[in-house]
Amino acid sequence: MPHPFSQNCGYCGKLTEPDQYDFDRCVERVTVIRRGGKPVPQINIKIRENLHAYCTRSCWEAAEPGLADTFEVQTTYPPFGFVNSCCRCGASVNRTHNYVRYSIAAMTYSTDGSPHAACTNDRDWIVLCHNCEHPEGPGTAAASQDVEVLEPEPL
Ligand SMILES: [Zn+2]
Ligand SMILES: [Zn+2]
């Protein structure tokens, strides 16, 4: 069933169902909070822009190689760390400062007309260093005030 935020799948063109995969560009940084005396990393997402949606996991998987070519990346799905290697050039990305991440998130949209969507799984697809894509570069002027906070999988 299409929902208010259905889009044409970025691979097959069909309208997406409430369970869809969102491909987003995020500008974010990682901070650390303490919980029960333990440091817990949190991803503070400053900007999240949706670029495409895919109707199923298999459409996403089919679209991935083409996207990897478009983004000219060597690696995908970096394991979470405070410092990662840029997926394009290998330079280090210090994630405690703003950086650009592209993510693939499994979403469940509500069908009652409200703009709510539950994110069941938000995976880092690629992270890029400032030389490859600067977080304050063009296209990020429309910063939102709300910061979305995510906790990555435990280290
Ligand atoms: Zn599709
Ligand atoms: Zn790079």
Image: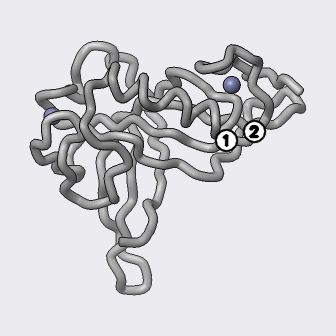
Residue at (17, 27) in percent of width and height: 132
Image quarter where ligand 1 lies: top right
- The image shows residue 35, relative to residue 104, as above or below, that is below
Mark 1 touches mark 2? (CB < 8 Å): yes
Residue at (42, 29) in percent of width and height: 65
- Residue wearing tag 2: 19
Q: Residue 93 carries which label?
A: none
- Residue wearing tag 1: 107
Q: Where is residue 110 in the image (x, y as percent from the top left)?
A: 81, 37
- Name the amino acid type tagged 1: Met
- The image shows residue 147, relative to residue 4, as above or below, that is below
- The image shows residue 8, relative to residue 87, as above or below, that is above
Q: What element carries label 1?
A: strand
Q: Residues within 10 Å of mark 1 (few under 14, many from 20)?
A: some
Q: Where is residue 143 in the image (x, y as percent from the top left)?
A: 38, 25
Colour basis: one colour
Could you tell whether 56 is left or right of 122 in the image? right
- Name the amino acid type tagged 2: Asp
